[in-house]
Image (spheres, helix red, strand yellow):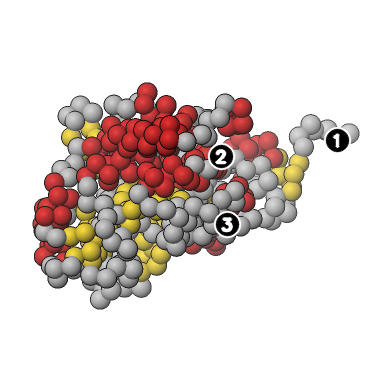
Amino acid sequence: MSETTDVELSHCDWCNDAFDSEYAAEHGQYGDSNICTPCQNDYAFRCFRCGETTPSDDSRWIESASDYVCDPCCDNYYWWCNDCDRYISNYDNCGCDSEDNDDDAVIHEYNYKPYQQWYVRQIETNTIVKTSKYDIIRNTPFMGFELEIECDNGNRYSLATDINNSHGSWLYCKHDGSLEQGFEIVSHPHSLAAFNLRDWSWISKLQQAGARSWNTGTCGLHVHINKTAFKNNSHIWRFTNLVLYNRHQSTRLAGRNDNQWASFTKEYKQVGKILKGDLDPERYTAVNLRNMETIEVRMFRGSLHEPRIRAALEFVNANFEYTKPLTSYDVLKNDAMSWWSFTAWVEQNQSTYPHLMQYLTKIKERSDRVSTLL
């Protein structure tokens, strides 16, 4: 008489052999109960980006990570350099000696991507330090800005040289086709606390040298924030719609109205469809969701006034932090998406957001005066 067994056998999705799924889950390399242990050991790997178990044939080696990624993650997060024969992160420049590499240029080409530096504040010493820790980079809200300027005196290369010489560790300059005689100044990503420790004197020096940003029809200020720091799509929805639902106040803070480069209306009430994948995002919107790695807040008018630039950075960070813990009940019943709820929260945290609070107060005072006249 044959022995009976209580083991429930499954069939491997890859080889179709029968196997003990419970044993595979406990002892398999990745714990996937639908793939037998031999297949996992011999033909599979786990993508370090998305964590999915993937056939080895569908993998690509990432030298900088010393690990494999699946094909979709490679397509989304890396590019191939033909000159140095390897995959590079979308955030990085390869650093090879190809003729397309303009690391020595004073003003780089519009598509220049340097090796990204991530700056944080070290609490113990209250100094700015670089970090390469994956968990910190992934979970901390890092911001980077792009400030467009015009140089009517024909001195743009000398101004860019001054920036490179004095602040080249965290700023670099790029050509921009939308500008007439200027360039854009781009920062490496920082936490807000790290930005607060930076020397911002270069802004007034540009102004003294005749550069312009506010009084032009071409210049904007764009602030990027990393998508990985957001809790989920609901957090991104709240972050984006705090701007779009409060267009009147947002444009006052931004210093410019709805326009072709930063529309407040193109995606109004469409954010949910975009996040579900039912609608392709536009690029030239007040909050651009099109980029793979970052959300780009494009609404701000260009400025060479330090408090305005600092206020823009504080706004993006404050929006992130304010909308992060909100629930559906807060949004639907507690009026959490109103501008005045947001302003009240910033006021409670004004030691963190002093420049933003200054401009929010001006907006409120202006609204109060208009209400009195009416």
Q: In this view, does 182 lie to the left or right of 295?
A: left
Q: Position of residue 102 (x, y in %)?
A: 23, 69
Residue identified by numbered label 1: 2
Residue identified by numbered label 2: 234
Cβ atoms at labels 3 and 2 below 8 Å apart: no
Q: How crowded is mark 2: few (under 14 residues within 10 Å), some or many (20 or more)?
A: some
Q: How crowded is mark 3: few (under 14 residues within 10 Å), some or many (20 or more)?
A: some
Cα distance in 3D space between marks 3 and 2: 32 Å
| Residue in the image at 29% along x and 26% along y | 351
Judging depth in this view, the residue of 90 and 154 nearest the camera is: 154
Judging depth in this view, the residue of 111 and 14 nearest the camera is: 111
| Residue in the image at 56% along x and 50% along y | 268
Residue found farthest to the right: 1
Which of pointers 3 and 1 indicates the residue nearer the eye?
3
Judging depth in this view, the residue of 243 and 15 nearest the camera is: 243
- Residue 55: image tag: 3
